[in-house]
């Protein structure tokens, strides 16, 4: 199977998953230092609802600008679940125009966000944080394979990977308690890469990703599942098949 035919998430799916996983987010306005963003949520109209410090530069500039809004860029950082030599898996840059959420729409917008992302910071909007809306003009994701852009329509049509919320604890558990699984998967790597330090890098419905840290640099390799999976049972079976386990349902051999 060539690299071009290996099943993998679309660019839009990768961005949607990164938005869910990203623990680090910054908003930057021209001429000012970036500020931390506690909440970043893609709304159904194609804009991002974000929270910024109520006394920060972003909130002040947006309020001063009024209906015109201000140009801004939201940066999301997707970190690997494990402490790797290069911990950043991808960066997402969302450029657009930032506006204040009108008071009559504030409560409804908070409710919409909280229904999918019950972040405690939402309870502090009005005291510690201000809720703003970033109208998207462009979205770009960059990782070890390069940089790609995606349209807002494709982003709205895509969905986060079904396992992105549980990926981090799973991979940490596999790396710490099931090194035999990592060793079996590492045996599937191209021979020149098997001498490096192999760590779990990612897990999604299309396959498993490994990071090989070698003397010649880092190498990321995707090991695809036979078919995409959508639930925990299918994921468990797919990993067993990938490992070469003869009992894909976790059954033990019958004793004679």
Image (cartoon, rainbow, N blue to C red):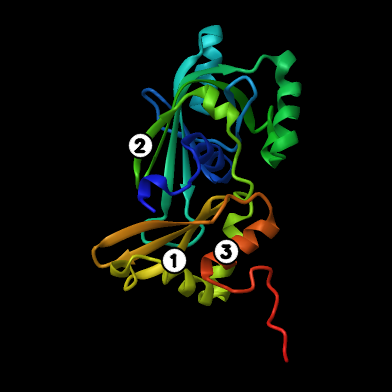
Given the current orientation, which residue lies at the most extreme left position? Answer: 216
Q: Are marks 2 and 3 in contact (CB under 8 Å)?
A: no
Q: Residue at position x 54%, y 50% from top?
A: 206
Q: Nearer the viewer, mark 2 or mark 3?
A: 3
Query: Spatial distance from mark 1 to mark 2, Cα to Cα?
Result: 24 Å
Say few, some or many: other residues with alpha carbon within 10 Å of mark 1 (under 14 / 14 to 19 / 20 or more).
Answer: many
Mark 1: secondary structure: strand
The alpha-carbon separation of the residues under discs 2 and 3 comes to 29 Å
* Left or right: where 126 falls relative to 132: right
Residue topped by disc 1: 199
Q: Position of residue 256 (x, y in %)?
A: 73, 92
* Residue projecting furthest to the bottom: 256
Q: Residue furthest front?
A: 256
Give neighbour class at mark 3: few <14, some 14-19, many 20+ (Cα, 10 Å): many
Q: Which mark is residue 239?
A: 3
Quadrant in which residue 167 is drawn: bottom right
């Amino acid at each position: 199977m060539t690299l071009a035919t290996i099943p993998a998430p679309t660019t839009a799916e990768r961005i949607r998953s990164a938005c869910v996983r990203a623990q680090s987010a910054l908003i930057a306005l021209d001429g000012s230092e970036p500020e931390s963003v506690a909440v970043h949520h893609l709304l159904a109209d194609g804009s991002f609802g974000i929270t910024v410090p109520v006394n920060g530069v972003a909130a002040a500039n947006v309020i001063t600008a009024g209906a015109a809004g201000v140009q801004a860029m939201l940066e999301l950082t997707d970190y690997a679940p494990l402490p790797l030599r290069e911990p950043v898996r991808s960066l997402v840059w969302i450029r657009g125009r930032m506006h204040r959420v009108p008071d009559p729409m504030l409560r409804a917008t908070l409710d919409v966000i909280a229904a999918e992302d019950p972040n405690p910071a939402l309870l502090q909007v009005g005291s510690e944080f201000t809720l703003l809306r970033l109208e998207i003009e462009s979205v770009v994701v960059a990782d070890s394979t390069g940089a790609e852009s995606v349209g807002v329509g494709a982003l709205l049509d895509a969905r986060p990977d079904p396992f992105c919320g549980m990926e981090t604890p799973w991979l940490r558990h596999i790396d710490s308690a099931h090194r035999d699984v990592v060793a079996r998967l590492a045996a599937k790597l191209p021979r020149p890469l098997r001498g490096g330090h192999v760590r779990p890098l990612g897990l999604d419905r299309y396959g498993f990703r490994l990071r090989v840290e070698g003397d010649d640099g880092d190498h990321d390799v995707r090991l695809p599942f036979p078919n995409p999976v959508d639930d925990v049972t299918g994921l468990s079976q797919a990993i067993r098949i990938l490992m070469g386990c003869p009992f894909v349902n976790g059954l033990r051999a019958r004793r004679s």
